[in-house]
Image: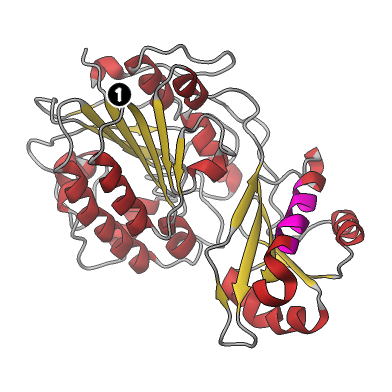
């Protein structure tokens, strides 16, 4: 069994690979994000994912399985209840979630929640529905600027989002209102995974643009994760993308915010040029936010192709002391009804130049094999209350 100096765990946000046995309970029977994306396009150019064995694991319309794949691969099944980003990532690092975070996609937020938020912020609330950020700004941005009212909305995720114009509402005031909302939504019946500040600029329809001053207020993990164990052992724990928000900064030694999934891969490539000892943990959100929720399978396919190009650059930088783990946190089949995540298993592709050959691994009953494998590799104990069985011996 080989131990690695650096592990890169990259989460392709929402790249599910087939419905879980209980998917029908979630209204997700027959979903298959990766398969649906492949079937939606005439060409699908992903040579690096192909070499690692993605099509050997999951048959694709245009991409053939390879005779000698470089990677080792399996499906991971979700043990937690739900199909949320935070649930999936927390499970990867050893925490099983049995009580899913609340979503308010169909109903909007309860009257009592909004009354308390309005009373404590001193603002009239408008919106209160599920919408895309760009759509709700076009609908209500001018009203917010003219009246000082506060746009509150949600999405298919477990989130409460508040918009604020940076010039008229003010960035600090927006953050303050979000902090109040986070406190209110700690109640079990209202508990959302994240409260998100959504600042924007512009004065009228057609000119509104969201800025990079977004800030997420997440629920802290309910216990210590593998990330905490790595940090406490003096190892590097470097995050890219939404990881810092998902874990509310817990267990990290460095965090890097990304402007896009391509930018996230560019950041990861730069990190791979550095000498560090530990974990680089990456979330690439555009697959989910731009294409899955917006039900655009062709856009999703093109995003995977962009990722594959950057993956080739990353692979060229990996040495025999490096391990790459590619996976996902849930599904979001862009051909399914509605705009919600979908309850799916996820792929795991593992690769190191030290591997002499690729092979199919046994499927795992939980995403937590990822954290357990990382913990064993670095010789740290899994925190109390965590789960997961390492597959390091198979890699």
Q: Residue at x 53, y 62 (%)?
A: 337
Image coordinates of residue 226 in percent, x first then y, are: 48, 23
Image coordinates of residue 114 in percent, x first then y, are: 85, 59
The residue range painted magenta reads: 173-182
Q: Is residue 360 visible?
A: yes
Image quarter of the N terminus: top left
Look at mark 1 in the image and give the residue it sits on.
Answer: 362
Instruction: Decide whether residue 175 is among the magenta residues.
Output: yes
Q: Residue at x 68, y 76 (%)?
A: 167
Identify which residue, 322 or 201, lies in the foreground: 201
What's the coloring here?
secondary structure
Q: Which quadrant of the view contains residue 62? A: bottom left
Say if 179 sits above or below 325 in the image: below
Label 1 element class: loop
Q: Residue at x 85, y 57 (%)?
A: 117
Instruction: Decide whether residue 184 is among the magenta residues.
Output: no
Identify which residue, 201 or 312, lies in the foreground: 201
């Amino acid at each position: 069994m080989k131990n690695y100096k650096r592990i890169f765990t990259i989460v392709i946000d929402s790249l599910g690979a087939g419905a879980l046995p209980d998917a029908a309970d979630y209204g997700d029977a027959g979903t298959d994000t990766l398969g649906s994306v492949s079937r939606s396009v005439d060409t699908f150019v992903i040579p690096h994912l192909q070499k690692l064995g993605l099509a050997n694991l999951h048959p694709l319309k245009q991409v053939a399985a390879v005779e000698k794949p470089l990677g080792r691969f399996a499906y991971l099944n979700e043990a937690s209840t739900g199909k949320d980003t935070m649930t999936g990532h927390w499970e990867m690092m050893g925490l099983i979630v049995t009580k899913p975070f609340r979503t308010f996609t169909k109903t909007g937020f309860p009257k009592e929640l909004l009354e308390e938020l309005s009373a404590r912020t001193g603002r009239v609330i408008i919106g209160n529905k599920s919408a895309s950020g760009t759509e709700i700004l076009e609908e209500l941005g001018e009203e917010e600027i003219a009246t000082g009212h506060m746009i509150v909305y949600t999405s298919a995720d477990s989130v409460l989002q508040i918009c604020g114009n940076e010039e008229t509402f003010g960035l600090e005031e927006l953050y303050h209102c979000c902090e109040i909302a986070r406190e209110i939504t700690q109640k079990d019946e209202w508990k959302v995974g994240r409260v998100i500040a959504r600042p924007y600029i512009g004065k009228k329809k057609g000119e509104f643009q969201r800025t990079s001053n977004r800030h997420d207020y997440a629920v802290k993990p309910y216990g210590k994760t593998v990330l905490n164990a790595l940090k406490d052992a003096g190892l590097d724990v470097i995050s890219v993308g939404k990881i810092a928000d998902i874990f509310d900064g817990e267990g990290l030694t460095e965090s890097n915010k990304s402007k896009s999934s391509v930018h996230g891969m560019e950041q990861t490539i730069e990190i791979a040029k550095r000498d560090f000892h530990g974990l680089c943990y990456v979330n690439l959100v555009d697959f989910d936010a731009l294409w899955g929720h917006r039900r655009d399978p062709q856009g999703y396919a093109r995003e995977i192709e962009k990722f594959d190009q950057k993956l080739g650059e990353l692979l060229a930088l990996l040495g025999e002391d490096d391990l790459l783990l590619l996976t996902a946190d849930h599904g979001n089949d862009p051909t399914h009804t509605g705009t919600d995540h979908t309850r799916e298993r996820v792929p795991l592709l593992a690769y190191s130049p030290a591997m002499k050959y690729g092979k199919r691994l046994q499927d795992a009953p939980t995403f937590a094999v990822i954290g357990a494998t990382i913990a064993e590799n670095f010789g740290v104990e899994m925190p109390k209350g965590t789960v997961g069985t390492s597959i390091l011996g198979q890699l």
